Image: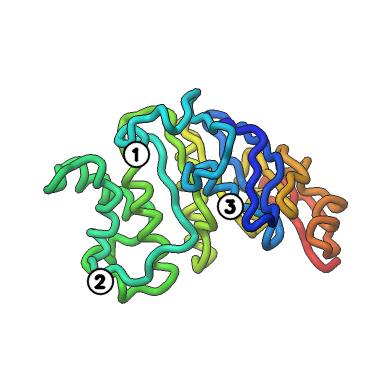
């Protein structure tokens, strides 16, 4: 679904990423984790074709991004960014409908209205439909932009790809799990998701595979129980931890400070 080799990036001679190899399969949720400054968001931006700084091509469905028609690419790939504009003088519905711009020229069709409504229901913002976006809390704005991304990928194309950079920021526990279940259901339909998270326990619970970065390099890239070991996590985060089985699904449960 997505393949990249030897991804490196430097800014003003300061190395941010070094020789990262990524291969993400159909129906897989890859979660990228690591300490602050590990290069997680930079890697996500490079993989999603937002930064044209990589000398070797990145392949999406066996084609480079340059080989894709822009409109067709918008039907198959979307990205949720960590930072969005805080000043958008539109209603919530209009912001979500921005995700449907590739599908209509002036007036939304019935399918666009239905896609926006469905996405707002999945992110629990239907009750905010007519609210001004600028009047919302940080968590509500986060869910509105997630709805926009989901609306963009609501079509009959098989094997779509979504990138998500810290999608759980400002969300309470209920909405964190609700969004993660939505993303997991997206991948169960044969689609792929690549997501940056800080919460290691949520990564362990929901990820199919985990990529752990430190100072721009891959420390581990495998299934959660192979990445989240006491030795690896304590070393990468320079903080003691204990690993025990999660009573819900037996995935690793990380307890710091012990």
Q: Secondary structure at mark 3?
A: helix
Which is nearer the N-term, disc 2 or disc 3?
3
Residue 215: % across, % down: 74, 54
As drawn, which residue projects farthest toward the front?
Answer: 12
Q: Which mark is residue 34?
A: none
Q: CA distance from mark 1 to mark 3?
A: 21 Å
Q: How busy is the neighbourhood of tag 3: few (under 14 within 10 Å), some, or many (20 plus)?
A: some
Question: Viewer-proximal residue, 201 or 66?
Answer: 66
Judge whether 215 appears above or below 112 on screen: below
**Front position among marks 1 and 3:** 3
Question: Viewer-proximal residue, 68 or 113?
Answer: 68
Left/right placement of residue 214 relative to residue 132 reads right
Q: Are marks 2 and 3 in contact (CB under 8 Å)?
A: no
Q: Residue at x 65, y 54 (%)?
A: 39
> According to the image, label 1 marks what residue?
74
Quadrant of the rendered structure where residue 96 is? bottom left
**Front position among marks 1 and 2:** 1
> According to the image, label 2 marks what residue?
132
Residue 217: % across, % down: 74, 47
Quarter holding the C terminus is: bottom right
Residue 225: % across, % down: 76, 43
Q: How busy is the neighbourhood of tag 2: few (under 14 within 10 Å), some, or many (20 plus)?
A: some
> According to the image, label 3 marks what residue?
42
Q: How busy is the neighbourhood of tag 1: few (under 14 within 10 Å), some, or many (20 plus)?
A: some
């Amino acid at each position: 679904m997505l393949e990249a080799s030897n991804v490196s990036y430097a800014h003003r001679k300061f190395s941010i990423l070094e020789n990262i190899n990524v291969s993400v399969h159909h129906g897989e949720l890859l979660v990228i984790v690591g300490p602050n400054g590990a290069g997680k968001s930079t890697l996500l931006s490079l993989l999603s074709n937002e930064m044209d700084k990589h000398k070797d091509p990145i392949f999406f469905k066996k084609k480079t991004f340059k080989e894709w028609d822009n409109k067709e690419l918008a039907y198959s790939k979307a990205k949720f960014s960590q930072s969005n504009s805080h000043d958008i003088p539109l209603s919530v519905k209009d912001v979500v409908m921005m995700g449907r711009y590739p599908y209509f020229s002036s007036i939304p069709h019935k399918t666009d209205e239905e896609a926006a409504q469905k996405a707002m229901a999945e992110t629990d913002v239907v009750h905010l439909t007519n609210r001004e976006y600028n009047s919302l809390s940080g968590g509500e704005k986060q869910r509105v932009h997630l709805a926009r991304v989901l609306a963009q990928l609501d079509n009959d194309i098989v094997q779509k790809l979504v990138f998500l950079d810290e999608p759980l920021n400002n969300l309470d526990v209920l909405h964190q799990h609700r969004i993660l279940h939505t993303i997991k259901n997206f991948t169960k339909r044969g689609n792929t998701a690549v997501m940056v998270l800080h919460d290691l326990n949520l990564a362990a619970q929901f990820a199919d595979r985990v990529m752990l970065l430190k100072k721009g390099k891959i420390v581990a890239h495998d299934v959660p129980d192979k990445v989240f070991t006491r030795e690896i996590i304590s070393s990468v985060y320079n903080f003691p931890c204990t690993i025990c089985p999660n009573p819900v699904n037996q995935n690793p449960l990380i307890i710091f400070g012990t």
